Image (cartoon, rainbow, N blue to C red):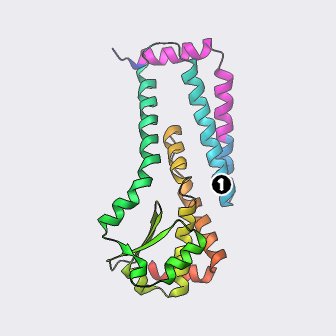
């Protein structure tokens, strides 16, 4: 029968017998150091790198604990490994098909049915991406899988330069969407909050500012908000 007390005692005994306590402690200290760098710096790339490093140190500590376990039928470890396996499969596989579900859900149509230049603009930045529009008065733009979705409300609200800034922002997300699921999975595996979203948005903004202009991006955001 499962007993929290028995499992805790087993963890303590196995870690002490395996002489892995210094390794686990060092990993956790390094994780805290990386998190402190994350909170003390303002550069998006540095913040993202530090936070990921902290997560990896936590995962290494968890791996050391799992390796040290000699007790059979540790329910907590079985639950964790099952949790990691299932979440990894979902997070890595879902983005490959989810954008197709969104196309059907929103009854999205290729943007070339109403105008050509957005698809051409995006193709110059990422040849694998497609642009779709859907019927909604709410101004929205988002990316998923290999597609960028624009609402009719967005197309009617912003001018061409502003729309280019919006598209460039979303293209950045598509060009890096293979990393985003990994960042989410690291959060799940390390039991930490996914703090990468803000940094990813900032990096996407920086890309849009470089490709188009800062003023166009700010103008588009002001109209949408």
User: Is residue 28 one of those drawn in magenta?
Assistant: yes
Q: Is residue 50 visible?
A: yes
Q: Is residue 207 above or below residue 13?
A: below
Which corner quadrant holds the N terminus? top left
- Residue 90 x %, y %: 41, 44
- Label 1 SS: helix
Q: Is residue 120 above or below residue 64?
A: below
Residue at (54% x, 74% y) in the render: 122
Q: Main secondary structure of the magenta part?
A: helix
Left or right of residue 125: residue 97: left
Residue at (50% x, 88% y) in the render: 159
Q: Quadrant of residue 208?
A: bottom right
- Residue 74 x %, y %: 44, 18
Residue at (42% x, 31% y) in the render: 82
Query: Dot 1, crowdedness within 10 Å: few (<14), some or many (≥20)?
Result: many
- Camera-side residue of 210 and 220: 210
User: Is residue 45 one of those drawn in magenta?
Assistant: no
Q: How many marks?
A: 1
Q: Is residue 221 visible?
A: no
For label 1, the residue is 47
- Residue 103 x %, y %: 35, 66
Which stretch did the figure color magenta? 5-32
Q: Is residue 22 above or below residue 224?
A: above
Residue at (43% x, 25% y) in the render: 78
Q: Quadrant of residue 144?
A: bottom left
- Residue 178 x %, y %: 54, 53
Which corner quadrant holds the C terminus? bottom left
């Amino acid at each position: 029968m499962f007993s929290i007390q028995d499992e805790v005692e087993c963890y303590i005994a196995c870690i002490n017998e395996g002489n892995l306590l210094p390794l686990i402690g060092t990993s956790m200290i390094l994780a805290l150091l990386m998190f402190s760098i994350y909170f003390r710096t303002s550069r998006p790339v540095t913040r993202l790198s530090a936070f990921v490093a902290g997560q990896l140190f936590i995962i290494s500590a968890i791996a050391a604990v799992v390796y040290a376990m000699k007790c059979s039928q540790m329910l907590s470890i079985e639950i964790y490994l099952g949790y990691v396996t299932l979440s990894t499969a979902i997070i890595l596989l879902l983005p490959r098909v989810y954008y197709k579900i969104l196309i059907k859900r929103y009854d999205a149509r290729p943007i070339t049915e109403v105008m050509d230049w957005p698809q051409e603009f995006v193709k110059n930045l990422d040849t694998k991406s497609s642009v779709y529009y859907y019927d909604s008065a709410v101004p929205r733009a988002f990316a998923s899988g290999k597609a960028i979705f624009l609402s009719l409300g967005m197309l009617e609200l912003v001018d061409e330069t502003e729309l280019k800034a919006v598209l460039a922002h979303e293209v950045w997300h598509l060009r890096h969407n293979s990393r985003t699921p990994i960042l989410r999975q690291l959060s799940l595996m390390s039991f930490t909050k996914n703090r990468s979203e803000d940094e990813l948005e900032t990096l996407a903004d920086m890309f849009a500012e470089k490709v188009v202009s800062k003023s166009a991006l700010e103008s588009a955001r002001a109209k949408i908000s």
